[in-house]
Amino acid sequence: MTLTKELIRRLPKAELHVHLDGCLRPATLIELARQAGLTPPAEDPEGVAEAMLVSNAANLEEYLERFSYAVSLLQTRAALERVAYEFLLDKADENIQYVEVRYCPVLHTPAMSMEQAFEAPLAGLARGAAETGVRFSVIVTALRTMSPTVSSRLAEMAADYRDEGVVGFDLAGAEQGFPAEEHVKAFRIAQRHGLGCTCHAGEGDGPDSIRQALHVCGVQRLGHGTRLLEDPELENYVAEQRIPIEVCLSSNVHTRVVESVGEHPVRRYFDKGCVVTLNTDGPLMDGVSLTDEYWLAHTECGFSREEIDRMILNAFESAFLPDQEKVAMVARIGEELQGIT
């Protein structure tokens, strides 16, 4: 069977690793910048898309700088709610049926209260879900560069919003010099309240970062995990324990973790039996959709339709949802995948 990008777009999909502040529509970015009295990076959406694309960063830290501008535009409840609403509409356009979106609420304070920073995107997501039928969950993200006390506070508040759609806790930001183990208390709080835990690791630092995430913080999923292959014993552990890896192909190229998509270890991980999922990370900064990432996996890494279907199912199976719900969802998605040729 000939696999096309259009066919991939029509396949039902799930996404587990995508940052809300990396998902602004270019046209919306222009409007929000002008409302905030700031100069947009370009005067038209095409120019904004080009300006926000991180194609020349030297490392993860430089890549993250581009997010700062986007965050500066999300300092009102209206802006946060709008971007969350449009985010879900955009996901629906490529048949993403379940998404876990993450963001750091504290980055939107003190312009608003922490409660408002939680509630505004949840309201936008709920409105988008009502219109599209896309199911969403939220992962609250703490930052390695912030105080562990802040991380613990975020974990506590994440638990308070479980009934509103918050399902997980994450740690992100610059890895080198900011070990995850310093935030272990926050992970313990999240776990005690039944939240799923993931952690950015093996992106800006080596296997020890992954080891800390797994063995010290006790996460159930790995964000990126790109440098896992540098420790074969740890790699075997991740494969044997069926720990999902949230792979972000284009992002890893832009942060210089790999030189090209074709050189990404995703093929190696999949062939070793790792639970590989594909994700966009920051669609605006990486210039991709989830459809694009699957297409790159096919054209640059040699993944077949059968293997793409397996990665799609991996994402649904790895969601931070109750097992009973996942079983029903995976069964339905499996039938849909078989019906699309």
Image (cartoon, rainbow, N blue to C red):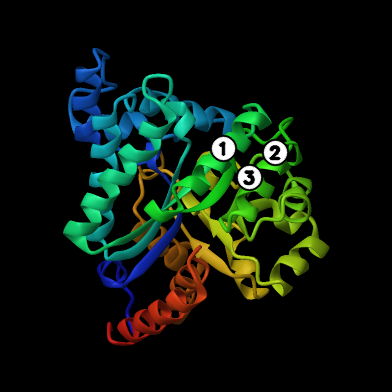
Instruction: Left or right? Give the position of 258 relative to 216.
Output: left
Q: Position of residue 28 (x, y in %)?
A: 21, 33
Task: Give the image quarter of residue 20.
Answer: top left
Give the amino acid type for the residue marked by disc 1 in the picture.
Ala
The residue beneath circle 3 is 203
Task: Give the image quarter of residue 274.
Answer: bottom right
Query: In percent of the image, x 65 and y 39: which residue is there?
Result: 204
Secondary structure beneath label 1: strand
Furthest residue toward top: 37
Q: First in sequence: mark 2 or mark 3?
A: 2
Give the amino acid type for the residue marked by disc 3 in the picture.
Glu
Comparing 13 with 85, the one in front is 85
Q: CA distance from mark 2 to mark 3?
A: 18 Å
The answer to whether residue 179 shows anywhere in this view is yes
Q: First in sequence: mark 1 or mark 3?
A: 1
Q: CA distance from mark 1 to mark 3?
A: 16 Å
The residue beneath circle 1 is 142
Q: Position of residue 120 (x, y in %)?
A: 31, 37
Q: CA distance from mark 2 to mark 1?
A: 9 Å
Comparing 44 with 14, the one in front is 14
